[in-house]
Image (tube, coloured by chain):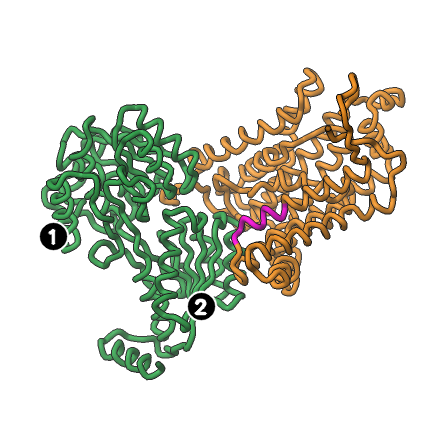
Chain colours: A green, B orange
């Protein structure tokens, strides 16, 4: 086993990836995860936990894991991180935006432990890396499907917080829908929570009562899917495969696959090659995966598959001009593609969205 | 057949003192049954729940930090409850106090001076007391049920904080995420000793507990509180005003809850967020009763409750049980405390046959 590790390390060195001078492999690594919701949310936290289990299965007894669920963002997360740091974790994944400051604070006191913060932007110490996925790529595909499948020409969007990641998703969904039906209408409800089945269900009901017949969400529970199933509407799953909660309702789902990333980073700790980085990967890297296209005619399915393939190959980018901002001014000229840096701070809607972005 | 509670003639002093310990013991037994049912080793589980957090210095500091708001709120509530005023809204007063205390570092963040922190403390106590004055006024003037009004004002406070943090107070450099800017150094509560994390919030809690213990035990005010609480009529004969007592009790508990809120945001979170309390104001009610409404008892009870939070995390990490068990434990503890207290003062009688007319159940 050690030999293979040595070979691997040698191979990476040969490949020109500069390993730190004091790179030291380990025989066994302890990876710890902190979740904002319960692992049983069947959405965001569940999916991160699936990633943990994936690596656990692959690495076997070279890996030990631990997790804390439903940790509130704030003072409690800092204590939870400190407990992890002191319980022998070598690498700690903090899987919610709100853990950003706590992650950096604790990382400062434990320079030998690697910290990986999901969806944040602060890397104040060399032992803090960040990672995120290009969920907006999947949003474009489901926007197209929604425009094809909706009888009323409108969809409802249950949104969490008006941060760039969520705004990207809404915009991308709308651009996808407009590519099929330029008159498409989108109603947005902000629930101001990542996980609250009651609130999410209420928002779903309000949207359906308001006349939309397709729901999509940027929150973590399966409640909107279940409401849509009761009302005979269509819905898209979020973060995880949710077909079990709406066998005749789910059109597809944007699945967050964290397993490969966790595998890569934990292996890097094992080999002593871990370095700070900011990862933003999507369909091409297998971090954003579409669930099977179900409950739709073959032509819609074919269109969705084609768009997915084009985004994966890099042939098409959802934010390709011409795109106008909500106020009518030009954002991207014909053929111009949005820069990653600009998307990372996105704080305005594209034209056609019937909502005021909370400012 | 029905069950009746009958008041006991004499109450055993021994059992009245032992009651919290009996309750704790019963909670532990229930815990063992619970862990066995979950297929976990009960000894390892209880060890990580109740002992592990006490074995390391850093963890003791965390214990003090977690216990501080519970103790501070609960000692205020104990005065309230003793005077027969039922302030259930400490959670709301905690939030409003935290917000009032944050005005300087958030709105006037350019003004950085050693005066900021003392003023934050004053603002927080005024804020919490003012918010508690609402149910006090409604009770004293309109005879409104203070349990309902104070409880409902909690939700108002939570939504007000939520709105403020998303709207006018949002950090302009925070990528639209709902949180205020971080407090500057002058607005952060200092540590009590340099080597550990415990901040002055815990100091405030201890001072408040000792002062109130002295007031309740040794002063006329303490006597007034107790007399009015036990019999408002008797208190009036003694020349005490029960209306004034309503204000006194609410303003005091509100001010302490507000101070706890400020200590939490200034000492631990260092900014305002949509949610700043995992229910401290409500847990403090358990703490107040577990501490027998005695300020010094409350210090011990606050530490025990804080231990269940920390132990819950330790147990999650070391033996992998869910965080729901923590809340179950706290619920069990309150259940057994109230159960023990009730059974010390009352006996259970099974009554067979038809109910007598006019008999109170």
Do badges 1 and 2 share one subunit? yes
Dot 2: within a 10 Å radius of its alpha carbon, few (fewer than 14), some, or many (20 or more) residues? Answer: some
Q: Position of residue B222 (x, y in %)?
A: 83, 34
Label 1 belongs to which residue? Answer: A315
User: Along the line of sight, which residue is nearer the eye, A134 or B318?
Assistant: B318
The disc placed on residue A64 is 2
Q: Main secondary structure of the magenta part?
A: helix
Q: Secondary structure at mark 1?
A: loop
Is B186 included in the stretch rendered in magenta? no
Q: Position of residue B126 (x, y in %)?
A: 64, 33
| Residue B123 appears in the rendering | no
Host chain of mark 1 = A
Q: Which residues are magenta?
A: B322-330
Judge whether A221 appears above or below B360 on screen. Answer: below
Judge whether B360 appears above or below A16 on screen. Answer: above
Q: Quadrant of the C terminus of chain A?
A: top left
Q: Position of residue A332 (x, y in %)?
A: 16, 42
The tag earlier along the polypeptide, 1 or 2, is 2
Residue B82 location, quadrant: top right
Q: Secondary structure at mark 2?
A: strand
Residue B109 horizontal side relative to residue B98, left or right:
left
Residue B294 horizontal side relative to residue A161, left or right:
right
Q: CA distance from mark 1 to mark 2?
A: 40 Å
Instruction: Say which residue appears at 13% left-offset and 51% top-offset.
Output: A310
| Residue B38 appears in the rendering | yes
Q: Position of residue B259 (x, y in %)?
A: 64, 40
Host chain of mark 2 = A
Residue A216 location, quadrant: top left
| Residue at the farthest front position | B353
């Amino acid at each position: 086993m050690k030999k293979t590790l040595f070979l691997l390390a040698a191979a990476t060195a040969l490949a020109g990836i500069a390993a730190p001078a004091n790179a030291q492999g380990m025989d066994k690594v302890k990876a710890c995860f902190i979740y904002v919701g319960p692992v049983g949310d069947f959405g965001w936290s569940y999916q991160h936990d699936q990633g943990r289990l994936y690596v656990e299965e692959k690495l076997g007894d070279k890996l030990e894991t631990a997790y804390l669920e439903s940790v509130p963002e704030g003072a409690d997360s800092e204590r939870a991180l400190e407990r992890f740091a002191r319980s022998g974790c070598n690498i700690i994944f903090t899987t919610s935006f709100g853990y950003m400051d706590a992650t950096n604070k604790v990382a400062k006191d434990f320079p030998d432990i690697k910290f990986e913060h999901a969806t944040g932007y602060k890397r104040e110490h060399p032992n803090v890396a960040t990672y995120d996925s290009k969920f907006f790529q999947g949003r474009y595909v489901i926007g197209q499907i929604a425009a094809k499948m909706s009888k009323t020409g409108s969809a409802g969007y249950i949104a969490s917080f008006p941060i760039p990641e969520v705004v990207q998703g809404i915009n991308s969904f709308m651009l996808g829908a407009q590519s099929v039906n330029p008159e498409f209408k989108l109603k947005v409800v902000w629930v101001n929570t990542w996980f609250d089945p009651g609130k999410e269900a209420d928002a779903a009901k309000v949207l359906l009562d308001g006349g939309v017949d397709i729901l999509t969400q940027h929150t973590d529970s399966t409640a909107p899917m279940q409401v849509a199933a009761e009302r005979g509407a269509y819905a898209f799953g979020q973060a995880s495969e949710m077909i079990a909660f709406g066998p005749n309702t789910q059109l597809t789902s944007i699945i967050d696959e964290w397993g490969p990333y966790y595998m890569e980073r934990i292996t890097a700790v094992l080999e002593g090659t871990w370095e700070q980085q900011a990862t933003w990967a999507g369909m091409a890297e297998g971090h954003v995966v579409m669930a099977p296209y179900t409950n739709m005619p073959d032509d819609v399915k074919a269109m969705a598959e084609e768009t997915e393939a084009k985004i994966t190959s890099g042939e098409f980018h959802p934010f390709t001009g011409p795109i106008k901002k909500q106020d009518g001014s030009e954002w991207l000229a014909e053929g111009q593609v949005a820069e990653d840096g600009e998307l990372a701070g996105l704080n305005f809607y594209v034209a056609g969205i019937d909502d005021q972005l909370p400012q | 057949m029905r069950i009746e509670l009958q008041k006991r003639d004499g109450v055993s002093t021994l059992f009245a003192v032992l009651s919290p310990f009996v309750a704790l013991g019963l909670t532990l037994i229930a815990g063992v049954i619970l862990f066995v049912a979950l297929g976990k080793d009960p000894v390892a589980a209880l060890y990580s729940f109740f002992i592990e957090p006490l074995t390391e210095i850093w963890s003791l500091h965390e214990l003090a930090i977690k216990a501080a708001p519970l103790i501070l709120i609960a000692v205020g509530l104990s005065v309230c409850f003793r005077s027969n005023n039922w302030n259930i809204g400490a959670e709301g007063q905690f939030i409003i106090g935290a917000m009032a205390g944050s005005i300087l570092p958030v709105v006037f963040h350019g003004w950085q001076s050693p005066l900021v922190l003392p003023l934050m403390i004053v603002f927080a106590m005024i804020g919490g007391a003012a918010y508690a004055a609402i149910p006090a006024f409604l009770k004293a003037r309109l005879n409104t049920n203070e349990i309902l009004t104070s409880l409902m004002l909690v939700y108002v406070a939570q939504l007000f904080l939520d709105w403020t943090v998303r709207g006018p107070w949002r950090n302009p450099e925070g990528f639209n995420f709902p949180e205020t800017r971080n407090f500057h150094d002058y607005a952060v509560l200092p540590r009590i000793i340099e080597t550990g994390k415990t901040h002055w919030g815990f100091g405030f809690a201890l001072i408040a507990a000792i002062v109130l213990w002295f007031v309740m035990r040794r002063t006329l005010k303490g006597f007034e509180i107790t007399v009015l609480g036990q019999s408002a009529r008797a208190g009036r004969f003694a020349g005490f005003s029960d209306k004034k007592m309503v204000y006194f009790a609410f303003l005091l508990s509100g001010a302490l809850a507000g101070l706890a809120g400020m200590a939490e945001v200034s000492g631990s979170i260092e900014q305002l967020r949509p949610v700043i309390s995992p229910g401290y104001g409500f847990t403090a009610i358990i703490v107040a009763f577990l501490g027998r409404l005695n300020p010094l008892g409350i210090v011990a009870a606050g530490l025990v409750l804080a231990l269940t939070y920390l132990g819950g995390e330790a147990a999650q990490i070391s033996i992998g049980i869910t965080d729901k068990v923590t809340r179950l434990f706290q619920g069990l503890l309150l259940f057994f405390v109230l159960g023990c207290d009730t059974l010390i003062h009352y006996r259970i009688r099974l009554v067979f046959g038809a109910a007598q007319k006019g008999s109170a159940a």
